[in-house]
Amino acid sequence: MIKSGVPKAESSIGRKIPRKDYRARVLAKQPFPSDIRVDGMLDSAIVRSPFAHAEIESIDIMEALKVPGVICVLTKDDLKDLDPYYGPVFRDQPVLAIDRVRYEGEPVAAVVAIDKKTAYMAASLIDVSYNPIPVVDSIEAALDPDAPKVQTETFKGGHYNKVLTNTDPSNSSNIAYKFDYERGNVTTVFKAADFVIENEYQVPIIHHFPLEPIHTVAKYDESGVTVWTGTQTAAVVRQDLALIFGLPQAKVRVISIPMGGSFGAKAFTKIEPLAAVLSKKAGRPVRVALSMQDTAKTIRRAGARVKIKSGVQKDGSIVARSVNIDYQIGAYADCGPRVAQKGGYVSAGPYRIPNLEIHSRAIYSNTPPSGAYRGFGVPQATWAYEQHTDEVAKTLNMDPVEFRLKNLLKRGEQYAEGDTPMDSDLAPVLKDLTDELGWNQPLKPWRGRGVAVSFKPSQAPSESTAVARLHGDGSVSILMGTAEMGQGSLSVMAQIASEELHIPLNRVFVTHPDTAMVPFDSTTTASRSTVAMGSAIQDAAKKIKEKLVKRAASFLNVSTDEIKIENGKIRARELQLEISELLMQTKQQYGIEICEVGQFLLTPTKAPLGGSTPFWEPCWVATEVEVEPTTGRVKIIKLLTAVDAGKAINLQQVEGQDIGSSMQGIGAALYEQMIFEDGVLSNPSLVQYRVPLFNDLPEDFRSRVIENGDGPGPFGAKGVGEGGLMGVPAAVGNAVAQAIGTRVNQLPLTPERVWKAIEDRGDLE
């Protein structure tokens, strides 16, 4: 025991500090899912359908089996002793196509071999006979009364059972899900409004294109199933695998490896069932490694069609609005219905609207399934309502910013009854951002400025549980289910534990999700992790600190009020001792390790989404663009964004998340679209699919982080990471409309579309 003071360690909360894993990533010592190798592992190749919709007549595998090095071939006939379906909303997606294929690229058979080259050679020899049937590849085609049905009867999945009630498992049409919300009397108020403005907008299907495609290794043996994969939802994957194989969840182990990006592409179950079934048949571990083209044909973001109508008064107040939004979710549900629910819910925008009617639908089509994508359906809705907001302001001859300032929800106002009141200052931040942009300054020819305000609810109901262990040497382990996909969760969770326990950050270690070790976590989605898992970790750390203080007070014979923990040391009066020393001295009475469980739980409420959001995630965007009138090319000159972090646990990561999200928003605004011809994807690779490059970024590109310490998470934190993508396309669209004097209602704003809009005006030289 030492008699001296101890210098107080500087808090890591709110600072720009390096991530704990940055060295491992920079030095290539952090393995990704594509790096995983397991003893005895075999490789595989998938045979994919060339048709978007067809009956499977026969599969001939005999030539493939003759190839030296081939271990086995898997077809639909091997699935008869399993329950081969999975999905978070409906259990509708099979491990392999069974009677028919529903999208181009759907897996039909798979080969396991000693190496990838052999597997691909054998796969090329498999002869599948198809009977093509009519294709439904658009929202309009799917809603035709005579359209063929994409899905037949399905079974509800478990993950979203309690929050998605208006589904149609019988699939009487191609409408998989409907979300409806109404308040007031829209029809009557429209008739009395001074102006009624109506518009329609289109948003294309786009792809996540994470740097690392989807990879999984699976091992099936007498002990159960183990998969090494990149997933945002380890608990959901475990549940699906247990149902497929008829195993207790305790015999299914899902290890989530830090990913090379996801943006939602690796949320919920993807290729894990196929890898596990292949392993069962082969009798050895099997790797399923998708290419970028394969990944594009596995999961993507929903396209949307939005019809929006507003009634306004001469003074600029919005009195009524109706929104009809259809999301094209693809051949299987995945989480598309939840996307349609959440995106549809906020499709009226963050405005004060007393009379409101929203109808949102998830529509099947013969295209790859759509799932989670940064923003979860909100970017599609924001594009429409913020273009429409400018159109309304133009009708009223009002400045678009002034119109927004008049109608934006104020802090404490409700968007919908039963949900969390608005917890951000929307109008003041927008005013500050537009002042910074120079909103009222003169513009050069062919330049325009635009703004957008978007908001998104986080996940509710929601649950996260964490285990914190204070070891005998004073180091700390955190066991949690939050996945690392590049967002820096491992660092943030360590910072929270370090701050709460007053233990140096380099003494706190966070484990990767492994369902055999870590407690339950709903998902790593919806910007929820800092608030939900962070609160669970803080709860566990507080419990440890309480026990530690009691031990120290008893050992030092002082009151608990006199105990201080600073920089990993215990101090009382003039006495100081190491945590390890205290634990050793008191081990006979209490044990040498303190272990506690922390939990964050949001139960269902009467809010329209099934639970009240723990926080709102708003974003503000202000931009200036320049259009080349002879080509239609759009160049972003300035791009300013703002996010409300409540309290930034790591300011560097918050800024990085917003900048990264905004860069993705530039892609969605100007370049990205998946092009289908009769259901066949014509641009599946980065050779044909345009993503933003560094040369596309504006010279003036800034992110502002709002910190009021008013969030529900640790130290007043809220969740961030999705904002820029939600608002950037809409702001760019508004700026382009001002620059060219007319509006393009369809994304992306390609040079061809912008040039044609200029030409169609006919009054511009």
Image (cartoon, grey):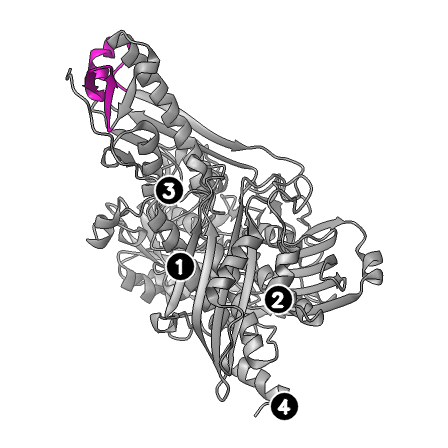
Separation of disc 3 and disc 1 at Cα? Answer: 17 Å
In magenta, the rendered stretch is 567-593
Which quadrant would residue 577 be assigned to in this image? Answer: top left
- Residue 649's label in the rendered image is 3
The stretch drawn in magenta includes residue 585: yes
Residue 511 place in picture, x, y as percent:
31, 37
User: In the depicted view, which residue is nearer to us: 245 or 484?
Assistant: 484
Regarding residue 482, the answer to whether it shows in the image is yes
Q: Which mark is residue 762?
A: 4
Could you classify mark 1 by the number of other residues whose Cα lies within 10 Å: few (under 14), some (14-19), or many (20 or more)?
many
Q: Residue at x 33, y 40 (%)?
A: 512
The CA distance from mark 2 to mark 1 is 25 Å
The label shown at residue 347 is none
Identify the element where label 1 is drawn.
helix
- Label 4 to label 2: alpha-carbon separation: 25 Å
Q: Is residue 641 above or below residue 697?
A: above
**Which of disc 1 and disc 2 is earlier in sequence?**
2
Query: In what quadrant of the picture does the N terminus appear?
Result: top left
Above or below 593: residue 534: below
* Residue 418 pos. (x, y %): 67, 39
Circle 3: residue type: Ile
Name the amino acid, label 4.
Answer: Gly
Mark earlier in primary sequence (3, 4): 3
Find the residue positioned furthest to the front.
441
Name the amino acid, label 2. Pro
User: Can you identify the residue that label 2 sits on?
Assistant: 400
Q: Which residue is mark 1?
A: 659
